[in-house]
Amino acid sequence: MPPDWENFPHDADIGIRGYGASKAEAFEQAAYALMAIITDPATIAAKEAVEIRCAAPDDELLFVDWINQLIFEVATRNMLFGRFSVNLLDNALLAMAWGEPTDVQRHHPAVEVKGATYTELRVTQENGRWLAQTIVDV
C-alpha cells in the first residue's frame, strides 16, 4: 500500500500529516510521517509490539497525545516503529506499534523529535477522507 502521509516544513520544526478512510487510519498514517522524520520507515522491522493507550476530551487533543506517546516510547525504549494499528472508541485510543531497537548503523537516525505541538493541529474529515496533522518540535 503506498504511503498516505507526508511531512511539511514549518520554520525550525516539521509538520506531520496522515490521511485515511477512517480517523484511526489517519492517525496510523501520521505515525509513519513521524517515523519518517527520524529514518526511512521501510528500514524498520516490525519485531516487537508495544501497546499504547491514551484518552482526551476531543479528537485534536487525542491526536497530540497519540503522537507524544509514540515519541515517549521511541525515547524510553530506544526503539523505532514501522507498523501501527489504531482503534478509537469515543475519546479513547488503543493502539499497537511494532518496531525494533534503534540501530544507528542501519537506521541512520536524522533528528530527535521532542514533542507534538498544538500548532497547525487538525483532525477533520474533508471530502470523505480523514486528515490528522500537527507540527512536531525537533
Image (cartoon, grey):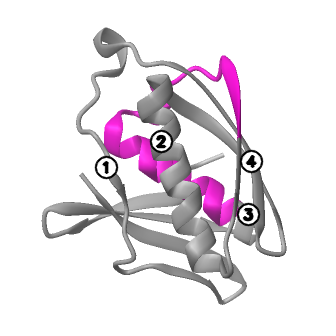
Q: Which mark is residue 72?
A: 2
Q: Which mark is residue 24?
A: 3
Q: Which mark is residue 95?
A: 4
Q: Amino acid at mark 1?
A: Lys
Q: Which residues are magenta?
A: 25-51
Q: Residue at x 57, y 74 (%)?
A: 61
- Residue 68: x and y in percent read 49, 54
Q: Residue at x 33, y 45 (%)?
A: 37
Labels 3 and 1: the sequence-earlier one: 3
Q: Is residue 112 left or right of residue 120?
A: left
Count of marks placed on residues: 4
- Residue 17: x and y in percent read 46, 66
Residue 114 lies, with reference to residue 40, above or below; the image says below
Residue occupied by mark 1 = 114
- Residue 84: x and y in percent read 67, 42
Labels 4 and 3: the sequence-earlier one: 3
